Amino acid sequence: MTLDAPTHLARPSKPALKLPPGACDAHVHVFGPRARFPYEPGRATTPSDAPKETLFALHDFLGFERCVIVHTAAHGFDNRATAEALSAKGGSYRGVALVPTAISDTDLKALDATGFRGARFHYMRHLKQAASIEDVVAFGGRLAAIGWHLQIHMEAELIAELSAALHRSAVPIVIDHMGRVDASLGLNHPHFTALLRLLDDRNVWVKVSGADRITRQGPPYADAVPFARRLLDVAGDRAVWGLDWPHPNHQGPIPDDGALVDLIPEIAPDAHARQMLLVDNPQRLYRFGPAKE
């Protein structure tokens, strides 16, 4: 199987935005190195390596002090690549794992001790679906004991269908990438209004990441900004932001990570909103220690 071309820029631009102390990039991945951490058999594609050292250098360049690594489906239930990255950062990075719902409590506690704080489940056409939404919500009952959350990555047309089950969750629910809505359909489209209704439940959070995924205009993603701002209007205390580096399965121009950082003031125009989005909210959700001034 051939190796996919990289989906991230080797030299992103330097952002103009000065990030607040303790700023968190709450959605990235690490891939490989595949010589040590093999990719999942049967995968549709073979991603280029994007190891922890490259991620750490990117965050140093952009100014992020904290991070949440979301384990990639390319590595399946083998969370070792993410776990190694978390261990290298001594508590300033957290993780979201991929696990089967039958995982033992002992293994869950071991992941928690490593720095994982949630479990992600996919309901996307291009990714393997491992469990029904009913089984996932039931599994969430086991996560309550260790303070984890459920992260749900779903097609926009499934938001209304899955909402009834998500409302029954015993642990917080985090919705990925603004629900993967299509920005060209507008703020009043049923997919986005279903997401807003779901967020009426204060147990539900949202990632205002993925402007480069929901756009239909491309950079600088101006059509995606109103969606992110509306989500902050209704759930500003339950929203986090992330680059989604190294932008796996990305369609369209490769995103400039520096430009994505400079989109934050468009999403969160005032310093208080940015403090909540980048520092206070992730600190609460992922259980970071207090940020240093």
Image (cartoon, helix red, strand yellow):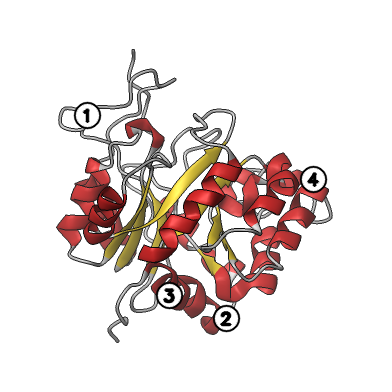
Q: Is residue 43 left or right of residue 223?
A: left
Q: Are marks 3 and 4 in contact (CB under 8 Å)?
A: no
| Residue at the top extreme, as displayed | 1
Up-down relation of residue 2 to residue 22 (above or below): above
Report the mark closest to the observer, 1 or 4: 1
Going by the numbered disc 3, the residue's amino acid type is: Arg
Mark 3 lies on a secondary structure that is helix
Image quadrant where residue 65 sits: bottom left
Local crowd size for mark 2, using a 10 Å CA cut-off: few (<14), some (14–19), many (≥20):
few
Going by the numbered disc 4, the residue's amino acid type is: Leu
Q: Residue at point 44% right, 20% down?
A: 44
Report the mark closest to the observer, 1 or 3: 3
Local crowd size for mark 4, using a 10 Å CA cut-off: few (<14), some (14–19), many (≥20):
few
The numbered dot on residue 270 is 2
Q: Is residue 55 left or right of residue 129?
A: left
Q: Earlier in the sequence, mark 2 or mark 3?
A: 2
Q: Earlier in the sequence, mark 2 or mark 4?
A: 4
Q: Are marks 1 and 2 in contact (CB under 8 Å)?
A: no
In the rendered image, which residue does mark 1 sit on?
34
In the rendered image, which residue does mark 3 sit on?
284
Image quadrant where residue 102 sits: top left
Q: Say whether residue 51 is visible.
A: yes
Q: Earlier in the sequence, mark 1 or mark 2?
A: 1
The numbered dot on residue 185 is 4
Report the mark closest to the observer, 2 or 4: 4
Query: How many marks overall?
Result: 4
Up-down relation of residue 104 to residue 172 (above or below): above
C-alpha distance separating marks 2 and 4:
27 Å
Mark 2 lies on a secondary structure that is loop
Q: Are marks 1 and 4 in contact (CB under 8 Å)?
A: no
Mark 1 lies on a secondary structure that is loop
Q: Earlier in the sequence, mark 1 or mark 3?
A: 1
